[in-house]
Amino acid sequence: MSSIKSPEKYYPEDRQKNRTEKGTLYLVGTPIGNLADLSERAKKVLSEVDFIAAEDTRNSGRLLAFYGIQKPMVSYFEHNKRERGELIVRRIEAGEACALITDAGMPAISDPGEDIVRLCAERGIPVSVVPGPCAAIAALAVSGLFTAKFVFEGFLSTATGERRETLERLKRETRTILLYEAPHKLRATLADLLRVLGDRPVSLCRELTKLNEQILRTTLSEAAKRYETETPRGEFVLVLAGAENAALQEDAFWSQMTEAEHVEAYIRRGMTKADAVKQAARDRGVSKSKIYNIVMKKEEASSNGGNDDDAN
């Protein structure tokens, strides 16, 4: 007899959030490549809800068939989210339980699922999450870059103006940056990143959890050179090192100013002297007292006619 206990014995429903409730939307994370990554709780919820809303019912149908799950499905994706979202919400309000899934990973993350979650929140409909794989977090974890602070940007816009604005903003971002990119757009994106952000460390993560999983830890310049001749394949997560403080200071408006001029620039913008000193110290990465002493010495010299020496 097997010594392996069922999940219900390890995690009884009266002590865990394992009971599937009516009138609830469930966000269910699905595998990003490896079918073995679907959790026991995810299987349970998918088996017990009244219907499933899926980004692509054909792809999700194959996943459900693999686990022997048969449930009515409705499509919910970017181009039908407005009218289909309302339909789904009405069914939940009528007492049905719905599981929302995407083709891979967590629904509502860089995904139209965020709209239906917002709609449920506005209507007072309970939303429960069944955590699962997320390509962005998986890539960050194996990137070898700083993970304590990061910013997720998803896919860069293809609109020229919006893309330029985003890249200019990211140029000054000190946190690690996560981006998604399709293989046919990778070369152009690497070129844009290198041109605006400058050369910096990057990890290119593709086909995560799949047979051809690859994590390439390199630099933007080397990555751009590599894919000039190599055809990108698979969906990519780009994990970019944040900007260095030294690089930011070189580009800063105050980079050619003295400490006193730096403070004066903020005062002209409407700050009090105390706030200007504090902000200048923060900009330069030094103590507030250091900036304050420099400013006070400058003011004393000015009041003495520009001479720091004692009068004879």
Image (spheres, rainbow, N blue to C red):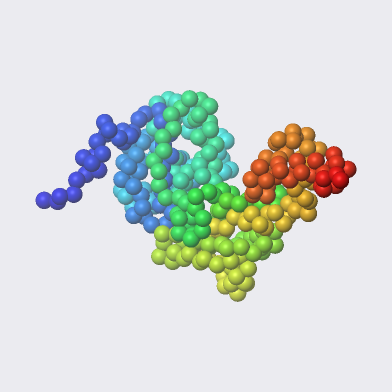
In this rendering, position of residue 92 left or right of residue 169: left
Across and down, in percent, residue 2 comes to: 14, 51
In this rendering, position of residue 249 left or right of residue 62: right
- Picture layout, residue 41 above or below residue 62: above
Along the line of sight, the residue nearer the viewer: 87 or 153:
153
Along the line of sight, the residue nearer the viewer: 302 or 77:
302
For residue 300, say whether it is visible.
yes
Total count of labels: 0
Question: Which residue is most to the front?
Answer: 312
- Picture layout, residue 124 above or below residue 50: above
Across and down, in percent, residue 35 comes to: 36, 55
Across and down, in percent, residue 160 comes to: 72, 53
Question: Which residue is most to the right?
Answer: 305
Question: Which residue is most to the left?
Answer: 1
- For the point 15% across and 50% down, the residue is 3
- For the point 52% across and 66% down, the residue is 217
Quarter of the figure that contains the C terminus: top right
In this rendering, position of residue 301 left or right of residue 126: right
- Picture layout, residue 183 above or below residue 156: below
Across and down, in percent, residue 19 comes to: 31, 33
Along the line of sight, the residue nearer the viewer: 293 or 89:
293
- For the point 75% across and 41% down, the residue is 296
- For the point 66% across and 42% down, the residue is 289
For residue 157, say whether it is visible.
no
